[in-house]
Every structure is written in C-alpha cells, then in structure tokens.
Image (cartoon, rainbow, N blue to C red):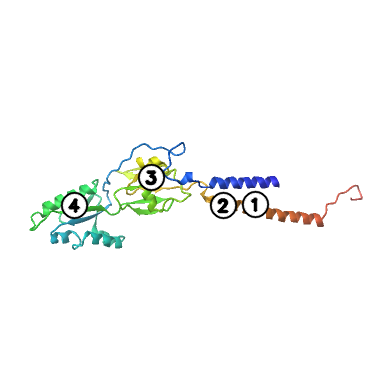
Amino acid sequence: MKKLKNIVLFSIVALALSSCVTARKVNYMQEPDREIPSYADTLSFEDYQIRIGDRLYVYVYSLNEEVQKMYNAGGSSSSQMRYQMNQGGNTYGSYELYTYLVDEEGDIDFPTIGKVHVQGNTTREVKRKLEEELSSLLKEIPGYSTISVEVNIMNRSFSIIGAQSGRYSINKEKMTIFEALAMAGDLQEFNSRKEIKLVREKNGVTTIKTFDVRSKDIINSEYYYIEPNDIIYIRQIPGYSFGINHVTSVISVTAATISFGAFIYAIVQTGINHVNKYYPKTTTTGEGGSK
C-alpha cells in the first residue's frame, strides 16, 4: 500500500510540474538558442494595395465652399465626418454616406468623375489620381483653387483565433505583431508563443507562416509587420487543461490528493478491522474439531 501511495504521489507531482508555465515559455525578446530560433534580417514593409471589397474614405479639401459641399456630405469637415463614422460606423447608412466601395471591377464611383480604377493602387496613388482628375475637371470654375484629397481605407482589420478571439481594426499605417497582440490583451500564460501561425492572402494566394514570437530576432524579420486581413492563430500549450500554473497550486492539489487517499484508506482499514473483530477467522485441525 505504501509503495502504491508513493507511485501515485510521484505521478501527480511530475504531471503538475510538467504543466507549470515558466518564464522561458512566455517572455518576449529572448536571445535565440537551440530552443528559440534565429530569424534572418528580412524585414520589409510594403504599402497596402487596395483590394476588391475595401471601402475608401475620401475627403476633398478646397477653399471654394461650393466644391467643399459638393464632395463632402454637405460641407462637413473631415474631423466631423470621422466623428460621425466613429459614432455610427457600424451602420450601413454612415458607411454609404462617407465611403466608396471598391466593386468587382476594382473601381469606385466618384461624383462628377465616374468610375476610377483603384484596385492594386496604394492610397497615395489614388490620392494623386483623384487630385489630377478633379483639378482638370474643376479648373474652369470661377474662384477655383488647388484641390487636395485625403484617402484612407476604412475597413482595415486583422483577426485572432485560439486566444482572445476577435476581429481588430488597424488604425495606423504600420502595425507590428506585438501591437496586434497588445490590442487583444496580450497572450495568456497558457498560450503558446513558439508556434504562432499567420494566415495571409495576397494576390489570390493564401500562405501560412509559422514563427516563434519569443525570439529577439523577430523585430528584423518578415514576421514583424502584419497586414490587413491577416489571421493570427494561437494554440494552447499542451497540459493547459490540467490547470496548474503556480507551485502553490501544485502543492495544494498534491496535498488534497494525498489527504483524500488517506481518508479512503482509513475507511477501508476500519472496515477490515471491524470484520476481523466480529467475524474472526476459524481454522480446522481435524475431522471433528476446530481450533
């Protein structure tokens, strides 16, 4: 019985300790070694190229009040329009009022210009294209002044699954993997950092990249920047379901298990003693007698 108790105790402690999360498993910016990979200096960032289904926010600046009203929802300022979109940006009406959908042909339908092809262009290229078109169109208007156009993509986002699952907006030109994880509330102790998978679609081709975000070299690699529509998959560290992440918890669980085992053992032993007391064993010594 004692040997069995020792085996059970050893197994529990070994399983508990194997489930503990160490700093090695969760800390970022660690030096590469045999466990943590080193990444080549392949850092690159390309301006986002507009895709079918994107929505473009376009604001036209002009000193001419009539031009301002013609293109900007009654002359509202850019800040007012942004505020209204933030307040009701999830509604169909506000998006339709202030943004232009890139259709299946890769075009937007812009007032007075008509179809403008934007697929595959950056926002800077679309800005120049619209400024040239509007300047050519409006130069005959009395009091015309130079046109300036602001172009932004309104539905830029990325998704995280497996941990803090959700869809998050990209609110800046360049977003790093660390900023993306921070927006999701960072990874929990039992989320694996060594095999993060990034699903990315570009030019109709879907690729899956796997990397270890603990490595210090990540900041110089191709994995550092995320792109709109990226999907970040984060799995759990094996052993998470056991639910032990502190030494005190290990001790508590082990002690409780031992106590429970001792309690069961005491009950069984009491039953055996009771049977031996009231129903003693008898042995026969011959044909007609007993001892």
Q: Gap between marks 3 and 2, in whole Å?
A: 36 Å
Tag nearer the camera, 1 or 2: 2
Residue under numbered circle 1: 258
Tag nearer the camera, 1 or 4: 1
Q: Gap between marks 1 and 4, in whole Å?
A: 76 Å
Looking at the picture, how far across and down is residue 69, in whole percent? 16, 61
Q: Gap between marks 3 and 4, in whole Å?
A: 35 Å
Label 4 sits on a secondary structure element that is strand
Q: Is residue 251 left or right of residue 71?
A: right
Residue under numbered circle 4: 115
How many neighbours does mark 2 have within 10 angstroms: few (below 14), some (14-19), or many (20 or more)?
Answer: few
How many neighbours does mark 3 have within 10 angstroms: few (below 14), some (14-19), or many (20 or more)?
Answer: some
Tag nearer the camera, 1 or 3: 1
Residues at discs 1 and 4 in contact (Cβ within 8 Å): no
Picture quadrant where residue 68 is located: bottom left
Residue under numbered circle 2: 248
How many neighbours does mark 4 have within 10 angstroms: few (below 14), some (14-19), or many (20 or more)?
Answer: few
Label 3 sits on a secondary structure element that is strand
Q: Gap between marks 1 and 3, in whole Å?
A: 45 Å
Q: Note whether 46 is above or below 262 in the view shown.
A: above
Nearest to N terminus: mark 3 or mark 4:
4
Query: Residue placed at 65% from the left, 45% from the top?
Result: 7
Nearest to N terminus: mark 3 or mark 2:
3
Which amino acid type corresponds to the residue marked 1 in the rendered image?
Ile
Which amino acid type corresponds to the residue marked 2 in the rendered image?
Thr
Which amino acid type corresponds to the residue marked 3 in the rendered image?
Leu
Q: Note whether 87 is above or below 222 in the view shown.
A: below
Residue under numbered circle 3: 198
Q: Note whether 218 is above or below 75 in the view shown.
A: above
